[in-house]
Amino acid sequence: MSPDERAAIGDLVRRRRAAQRVSQEAMAGRAPMSAVTWGRVEDGKSVRIGTYAGVEAAFGWPLGSLTRYAETREEPPDADVEPVHRPGGMEKGVLESNYPDAVKVLLIKALRADGDPIDALLHADAPDGNKVKAIRALRELQAEYAAGRADPERPRDHSKPA
């Protein structure tokens, strides 16, 4: 992405955040990412492409909205719903769980990947058994978060076979 495209995205993100009267820290928490990373986006600095997915989620925009904006200057619509909770809490839940380490690594990589985490798991260079365990674990985590039952402070015991 060119410096001009990053600057345009940064201006859009700053403008939309200010219109909502929300701090960088609060928006970064929705993303989830650090406030420093959010600031890099607003400053038009280079960030990982996956970072833009977090920004889009924080605003409730469709995935790819910022890339499209960089190319066309077509602004994403205002979201009519609450922003989607992104996997930052899930990552914490994975790290604190009792999943085997190989499955934890696959899950974290999938949660941080661009696009669908299931696709990332399917394309991972790992034994099929670990992929199956990771997909089952991901579906369980997604269901807990969707139902609002997830408690990142409560470690889960996933050492039993699925």
Image: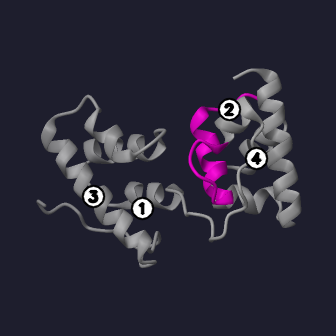
The residue at 69%/23% (across/down) is 1
Above or below, 56 relative to 157: above
Residue matched to label 1: 93
Q: Identify the residue under disc 4.
A: 75
The label nearer to you, 3 versus 4, is: 4
Q: Which mark is residue 66?
A: none
Q: CA distance from mark 1 to mark 3?
A: 11 Å
Location of residue 37 by image quarter: top right
Quarter of the image for residue 128 reads top left
Residue at 21%, 43% in the rendered image: 131
- The residue carrying mark 2 is 47
Residue 155 colored in magenta in the image: no
What residue lies at 47% left-to-right and 58% top-to-bottom?
Answer: 92
Q: Earlier in the sequence, mark 2 or mark 3?
A: 2
Helix, strand or loop at disc 4? Answer: loop
Mark 1: amino acid: Gly
Q: Are marks 2 and 4 in contact (CB under 8 Å)?
A: no
| 117 left or right, relative to 137 | right
> Which span is picked out in magenta?
45-65
Q: Amino acid at mark 3?
A: Ala
